[in-house]
Image: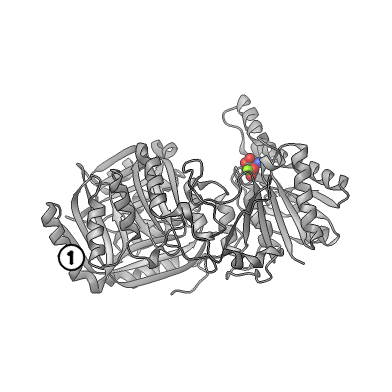
């Protein structure tokens, strides 16, 4: 029988009336012929209260005790929920993480789920019970209680759905779905009726915040359809499901990530291993690096810029300074108070001119772009904090996101309406409801492909004034010449001048260089430099950024293979590296070897 996992967040179980209402939703779903697992969070703000209590006693609570404490919140909720169901004439069993068989690693307060053994849950479901599961918690191999990190109940819910396939997962929350951008920042945001896992991951990774990112990663890995809806009304919500089945919009959503800090290591010697030194030192401080931009080298050196969250700033600067000395770079610069604006869409890669339109929109609004990266489904720019809200708003409007096109959604979504779509059998190569023999585990990073695109060339224009409109001008002219641009990178630059690097198809190379020379001359910028024979290596997967060691391993393996990286960019689901064509196969082999343990797909 099909399983529906219904998750209720803290606000959805904040008092006993709400608990009763949630119980009724679960009983209704069961009455329609489904087996039902509820995943419940701690009531209201009770986890926050527990955190505060600990804080009154100590600034450094032992992590094991923290988990012992925080896990009690969910235990209260499941017990009350089960009582409510019994009182309403239903059958229910409340279960803790350990009773559920949710095995995690031993990382207290931020544990990852390894496996879920489903026998006990199945037995209770088959006996006609609603299983009421504690979200957010699990148990490690030593029998200790662990928690998954704040907001982790979403992850519990989708993981349970993955273990109990065929299934779907319904997230009941205090908002009525997923929006094209945060509606608190942009009133004209529209609600998706459907959005793909990849888009959702890129948006959630920006703190678009409806769901715990790890839960979407699990959904993508196992093909679990997720429905986000309000627990307080009957309005239709948003479906999140497989990338292949959702519409390929050029731009589906936009997001703003505030409180970023831009760090630049200048004059990094252009040789294999330099990036490794910088990023491994930072990774050792457990800092997640966001936008990484490295431009093509002139005069044997290049600048590497990246962003981190403001809280990680002191650690990052310290680590970067040590690295800079070690590799003989020019030093470390930084700019605080910047914000990242991203647009995301599965169809971006097939739609020329999306990035150019974003730059033009920002230029028209007088907003200066501090840094750019683009990948197949995302274009991100860094702007100053004070421009951030306006930037989000003009971009959202420019791409028509306030009037999102929903054509055909109703038909596509009909298959979910009757409960569970039977086709939601495993859709990915990984099949591991329980710990599988090959040692993979449920939240493990997954690499779907490492592919080489060898038909590209790289062009860079230097000394571009750091003022509004230059990127828009350059890419506007390239667009008018019908030249398709793939990856774009604008670095932080020095003395008010930045560099813009980008890749084009090799057949457009000569034409594009000529055009750039012309632009450079007309506007007194440049020089233009180029590499005709390059290849783009794309690593695609799930969890590439939430597993902070991946970027580190990538740089390490390339450096060990003596491959020099000419341009890099990263996103949640993809890392792109540009290397010289002659080194492409070496680079690919090095990566395949390095990631043998997590690579599930073949190459493309
Ligand atoms: N109660 C936990 C928290 O507040 C888990 C959750 O709500 O998802 O973070
Ligand atoms: Mg929550």
Residue 165, picture quadrant: bottom right
Most foreground residue, 595 or 466: 466
Question: In the rendered view, does 259 fall on the left or right side of 298?
Answer: right
* Total number of numbered discs in the rendering: 1
**Image quadrant where one finds the N terminus:** bottom right
Q: Which residue is drawn at 55% across and 68% down?
A: 245
Most foreground residue, 542 or 181: 181
Q: Tell me, yes or no, if residue 35 can be seen here.
A: yes
Residue 568, picture quadrant: bottom left
* Callout 1 secondary element: helix
In the rendered view, would you say 257 is above or below 245?
above
The furthest residue to the top: 56
Most foreground residue, 312 or 358: 358
Give percent across and percent down for residue 417: 68, 63
User: Which residue was labeled with disc 1?
Assistant: 513
Residue neighbourhood size for the residue with mark 1, other residues' Cα within 10 Å, grouped as few (<14), some (14–19), many (≥20): some
Give percent across and percent down for residue 3: 73, 62
Question: In the rendered view, does 10 fall on the left or right side of 319?
Answer: right
Q: Residue at x 47, y 41 (%)?
A: 185
Q: Which residue is drawn at 26% across and 68% down?
A: 482
Most foreground residue, 113 or 339: 339
In the rendered view, would you say 175 is above or below 531?
above
Q: Tell me, yes or no, if residue 326 can be seen here.
A: no
Q: Residue at x 28, y 47 (%)?
A: 364
Give percent across and percent down for residue 135: 69, 47
């Amino acid at each position: 029988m099909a399983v529906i996992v219904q998750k209720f967040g803290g606000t959805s179980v904040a008092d006993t009336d709400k608990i009763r209402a949630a119980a009724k939703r679960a009983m209704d779903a069961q009455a329609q012929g489904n087996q039902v697992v509820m995943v419940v969070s701690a009531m209201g703000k009770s986890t926050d209260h527990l955190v505060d209590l600990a804080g009154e006693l100590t600034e450094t609570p032992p992590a094991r005790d923290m988990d012992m404490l925080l896990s009690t919140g969910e235990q209260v909720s499941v017990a009350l929920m089960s009582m409510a169901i019994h009182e309403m004439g239903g059958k229910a069993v409340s279960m803790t993480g350990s009773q559920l068989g949710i095995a995690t690693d031993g990382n207290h307060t931020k544990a990852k789920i390894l496996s879920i053994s489903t026998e006990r849950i199945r037995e209770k479901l088959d006996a006609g019970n609603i299983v009421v599961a504690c979200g957010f918690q699990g148990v490690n191999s030593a029998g200790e209680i662990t928690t998954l990190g704040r907001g982790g109940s979403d992850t519990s819910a989708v993981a349970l759905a993955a273990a109990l396939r065929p299934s779907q997962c319904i997230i009941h929350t205090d908002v009525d779905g997923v929006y094209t951008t945060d509606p608190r920042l942009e009133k004209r945001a529209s609600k998706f009726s459907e959005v793909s896992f990849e888009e959702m991951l890129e948006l959630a990774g920006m703190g678009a915040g409806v769901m715990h990112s790890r839960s979407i990663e699990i959904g993508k890995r196992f093909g679990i359809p997720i429905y986000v809806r309000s627990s307080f009304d009957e309005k239709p919500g948003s479906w999140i499901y497989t990338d292949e089945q959702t519409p390929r919009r050029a731009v589906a959503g936009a997001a703003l990530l505030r409180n970023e800090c831009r760090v630049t290591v200048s004059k990094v010697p252009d040789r294999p291993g330099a990036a490794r030194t910088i990023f491994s030192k930072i990774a050792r401080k457990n800092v997640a690096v966001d936008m990484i931009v490295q431009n093509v080298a002139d005069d044997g050196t290049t600048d590497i810029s990246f962003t981190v969250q403001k809280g990680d700033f002191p650690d990052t600067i310290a680590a970067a300074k040590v690295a800079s000395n070690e590799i003989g770079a020019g030093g470390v610069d930084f700019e605080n108070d910047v914000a990242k604006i991203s647009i995301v869409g599965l169809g971006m890669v097939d739609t020329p001119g999306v990035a150019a339109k974003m730059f033009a929109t920002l230029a028209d609004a007088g907003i200066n772009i501090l840094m750019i990266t683009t990948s197949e489904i995302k274009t991100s720019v860094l702007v100053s904090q004070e421009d951030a809200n306006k930037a989000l708003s003009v971009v959202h409007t420019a791409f028509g996101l306030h009037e999102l096109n929903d054509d055909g959604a109703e038909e596509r979504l009909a298959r979910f309406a009757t409960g569970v779509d039977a086709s939601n059998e495993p859709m990915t190569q990984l099949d591991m409801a329980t710990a599988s023999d090959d040692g993979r585990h449920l939240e493990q990073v997954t690499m779907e492909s490492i592919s080489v695109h060898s038909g590209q060339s790289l062009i860079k224009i230097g000394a571009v004034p750091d003022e509004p409109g230059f990127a828009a001008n350059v890419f506007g002219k390239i667009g008018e010449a019908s030249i398709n641009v793939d990856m774009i990178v604008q670095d932080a630059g020095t003395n008010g001048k930045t560099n813009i690097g980008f890749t084009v198809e090799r057949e457009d190379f000569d034409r594009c260089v000529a055009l750039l020379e012309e632009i450079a001359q007309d506007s007194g910028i440049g020089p233009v430099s180029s590499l005709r024979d390059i290849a783009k290596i794309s690593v695609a997967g799930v969890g590439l950024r939430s597993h902070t060691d991946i970027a580190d391993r990538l740089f390490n393996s390339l450096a060990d293979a003596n491959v020099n990286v000419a341009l890099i960019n990263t996103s949640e689901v993809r890392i792109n590296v540009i290397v010289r064509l002659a080194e492409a196969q070496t680079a690919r082999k090095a990566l395949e070897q390095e990631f043998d343990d997590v690579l599930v797909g073949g190459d493309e």
